[in-house]
Amino acid sequence: MSNSSSLYLTGYRCFSFVTQEKNNNLPKWTESSIKKTQTIKKIVCGNQHHFLVWKKPNKLEFYQERYEKRKYQLPKNETIKDIVSSSYTYLILTESGKVWSLAKTNSFKEVPLLDADQSTFEEIRYVTFFEEKKLFVNSLAMGSYSCYYLCNGDQLYASGSNSEGRLGIGHRGGQETMPVYLQDKVTKIFSGVCASGFFFITSQPDCLYACGQNNYGELGIGPNIVYQGSPAVVKNFKGSEILTVSSGNSHSILITKEGQTYGCGQKIRNGQGDQKKFFTLIPQLKEKKAVQLAIGVSRTLVLTDQNELYMWGFQVYLCPTDKSRNHHNIPTKIKLPGFFTKHLESKDMIQIASGSSVSFLYLDFNNTLPQDLRILYESQKFCDCEIGTMGNQIPVHKALVECRTKLTIDQIQKKLFVEKSINKEQTLSFLKWIYYDEISDHEKLEQTFNLLELTFPPSVDNTLEKDIAQLYQDDDSKDFKILVKIDDKDEEEENEKEKIKEMVNYEEIPVHKFILYARSGLFRAMFDNINENENPNQVQDYTLKSIESLEILIKYFYTNSIEMTADLNPELIIDELSDAVEYYQLNNQCNFEFELNKIKNQFDLD
């Protein structure tokens, strides 16, 4: 698969080996030298000028000028689910519910490791505590010297420093080396890189709770409370209404699911320009719908659904040429670097991150294949067989199911519904993984894999992208043909025979109907509106003038990459494919354009 990212950073004591800048204090958004690599899934920043980049399913890269770049790899059967960070420590969560840690010497004290004396950022270490206690970790959060773990669906644990009551286990200080149990019925947990407290949401009651330091009112629980040692309700919000909440050193920002942005805490950082002891709507963002939030020690970034970036705090740089260290205590719209502004119409593309001294913007050319196949899963269009027990059969696409499992439909039916009888809920959990790699119910999916004698969790080599790319080679299961008009007559011949009925020749391109339906809005609309008189197994296409261009586009549907050799006339094909994103209504505009640019560079085309 060909995915890539474009990364910019700004801030104090940035890294010269990353930015290729002699002065590593960057008063502007500067493009980094690690941009043309594999897709950046997430960047997490620490407090002391270092950051961790998650690229591949089980691979990480650590950047800090003192130690240069370091690479790490988890075991092949582990797939990263999320990464969180605090001042000197990173926690890595895998799809198997296991936790791994990377930390500076003597900073492992906040992580449940018995032998914490290790070399600085030397290796990723496995946290055995949760496996020994038979706890499956669903999600993580980290504050300053504190860690929070949501386990077995809704059970909250915490470890690390309880200074200022930040673990929520009372006002006593001290260090909790091993995680302590707090409560159940917890649905989400939040903190911040340098936060001295944390937030969590419960389902019963439907509330947002906070505990920890409240010197400036940064917990949003009101005045006259310096330290909140036990969880206190944050008033005026239901937990189900909240998208995210995060804390800096002395302020917190909350975003609702409707996109409204609230701030509390220190006036020079909370976005209000005034001291607030309760979460208060930020006036400058009242008419905006916020979708992303990133908080470091002293600055806050908020991204809207229109890809507008607002920033405030210390050392906020307004545009790429700004060379002053400006301090803004209210949200200020940032002029993004040129490459970003070209693609503002694309949603869910720009991602943001912030640490103590550095902030990041990165264009993530995400593979939209899982989202596209989710459309197919929900529509059940062109399903050609069923799995399940009598009365509870579920329509599926045979070629896709067999490609993902390397088993036949008959084998799956026998193992799951004849020899055993799994219920519909477990079947749906299995199909969500088949179609779009979602592990919605870890326990049920593991049971299904065991019945099918498949390895669980899926290895990093067993990915949706790889399986769909292999499906491109499966001509036997292709059930549709695109006809491309072949015009091999010269004008003289046509003039001589203008009275004779012209016989039109076509060349055929075989494809899976469900791939066309999932990947192209044009074909999706066509299939949804096809009439009874039309041939449901073929369609004529005259948009791309050469069959080579259309063949390359169809292969792109399967592989997310564009490949060609010089004998195919790259200049002509690039010209013909230039309007493909709009005409065929492709979701992943950035990746398609990146692939075209890659071909231009390969053949030195302008």
Image: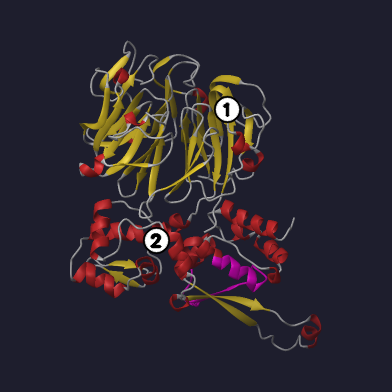
Residue 480 image point, x, y percent: 49, 75
Quadrant of the rendered image containing residue 361 = top right
Q: How many marks?
A: 2
Q: Position of residue 44 (x, y in %)?
A: 46, 37
Q: Which residue is mark 1?
A: 13
Name the element at disc 1: loop
Q: Are marks 2 and 1 in contact (CB under 8 Å)?
A: no
| Residue 432 seen by the camera | yes
Vertical relation: 273 (above or below) 138: above
Image coords of residue 152 (percent x, y): 23, 43
Callout 2: helix, strand or loop? loop
Residue 544 falls inside the magenta stretch: yes
> Local crowd at mark 1 within 10 Å, few (<14), some, or many (≥20)?
some
For this view, does 146 lie left or right of residue 340? left
At label 1, the amino acid type is Arg
Q: Tell me if 540 is positioned left or right of 71 in this view.
A: right
Q: In the picture shown, does residue 579 fall above or below 74?
A: below
Counting residues from the start of the chain, the first of labels 2 and 1 encountered is 1
Q: Amino acid at mark 2?
A: Asn
Residue 293 at x, y = what percent? 46, 33
Q: Which residues are magenta?
A: 529-555
> Which residue occupies 51% across, 29% down?
49
Magenta run includes residue 558: no
- Residue at (58% x, 35% y) in the render: 9
Disc 2 target residue: 462
Observer-nearest residue: 541 or 595? 595
